[in-house]
Amino acid sequence: MAQELYIATNNGDMGGGEVMLLNIARAARSLGYRVTVIGPAHPPQLVEAAADEGFARVVLPARTRSQYMMQLRAWHSAHKKVLLWCNGLVPAAATGGRKNRIVHLHQIPEGLNAKLVPFARRKASATLVPSNFMARQINGAQVLSNWVSEVPTDLKHDNTDVIRVGFIGRLSPIKGIVPLCKAIATLTQGGGAYRLVVAGEPVFTSEVEQEQVERSLSRIAEHTERLGWATPEALFNNVDMLVVPSLVAESFGLVAAEAMSARVPLIVSDSGALPEIVGENYPYIVPKGDEAELARTISIVAEQLSSDSEKLTSTVSDAFWRWQELYSPEAGKERVREILEQHISPA
């Protein structure tokens, strides 16, 4: 009989943590575990996605976060013998103080959330985080790196006079879009032919933040193409390089890992775990918020693209193999195997 694993979501809608929940569920199922996903009825996106992939579900009739937490704690009271993977602080806090749980934190808790962490972790079998950077912030945490599927690209870049610089993600100042716009402005004012290709929407941002981003983009409007929401594949097939200029202390860097898998030349800031994802010797890491250094690095990569530089080719190839070894689904599956074997007794 297959061993059971229950995974409780942090949110009912789909975000980075929920993408990882489904990745974990797929990995566990492929290892022979019987996986059940737990989530609220509203928002329904996560439980619907789980159903689409054939996972068993426990759908709690919650419409608010507090309702979900209370209902999850009540459910867990009747199911304490099964291993519960708490995919985020919300389910971990809801079931705090109880055994037979894995607490998986995807973001560094701040403010009130930080005060919930000790209770959320109390009596848990393990606490997992996605990077060594985050593990240094949470004493005793174990690293379970995130992983991404390979993003298919045609690996061809048109030999045009315009260098296409990509950005994908939330259009928020903390994601570094403002210094990136300034860097593009510097490059174009200096006579360079560059085009910023932007994929993303201003979700979870205030009106003030949206105005700040829009002002920055409007200043380089003639050098900008806006795709709105787009998949990484759609963006990567239309750019010459990707920039991840985040100003916030990223706990991982899914977009960076996706670019590595797609063999897209990649520039990252030195914020949070981003340098860890690309590797400490990676040549295209810039200080966060430094638009002058960002502009310089973009121009270096552009020159290497134009000259078919062996250095750039080697760097991109090394990044791909780093993804394959550390951040591919195969690598993630092995890490899930190790964790579950530690915490689920053989049937």
Image: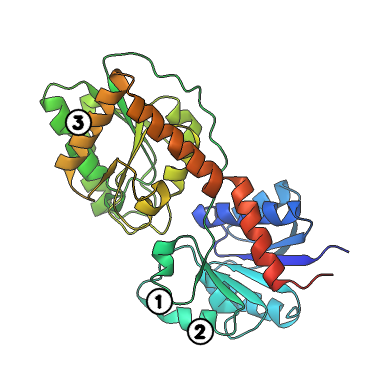
The N terminus sits in image quarter? bottom right
Q: Secondary structure at mark 3?
A: loop
Q: Give the CA separation, mark 3 to mark 1.
A: 39 Å
Identify the mark at residue 119; answer none if there is no mark.
2
Judge whether residue 20 can be spotted in this image: yes
Left or right? Give the position of 169 relative to 293: right
In the rendered structure, the answer to whether residue 247 lies left or right of residue 122 reads left
Residue name at image x 27 percent, y 47 percent? 176
| Residue 60 visible, this orientation | no
Measuring from the top left, give residue 70's x and y in whole percent. Answer: 60, 78
Q: Amino acid at mark 1?
A: Ala
Q: Which mark is residue 207?
A: none
Residue 343, relative to residue 31: is it above or below? below
Say which residue appears at 80% left-offset and 66% top-offset.
Answer: 3
Task: Look at the numbered disc 2 and give the secondary structure of its residue.
Answer: helix
Specify which label sits upstream in the sequence, 3 or 1: 1
Q: What x and y, as percent, mark residue 228?
A: 40, 35
**Residue that carries the numbered disc 1 in the rendered image:** 114
State the residue at coordinates (49%, 33%).
Answer: 262
Question: Whole-percent x and y of residue 286?
Answer: 24, 46
Amino acid carrying label 2: it is Phe
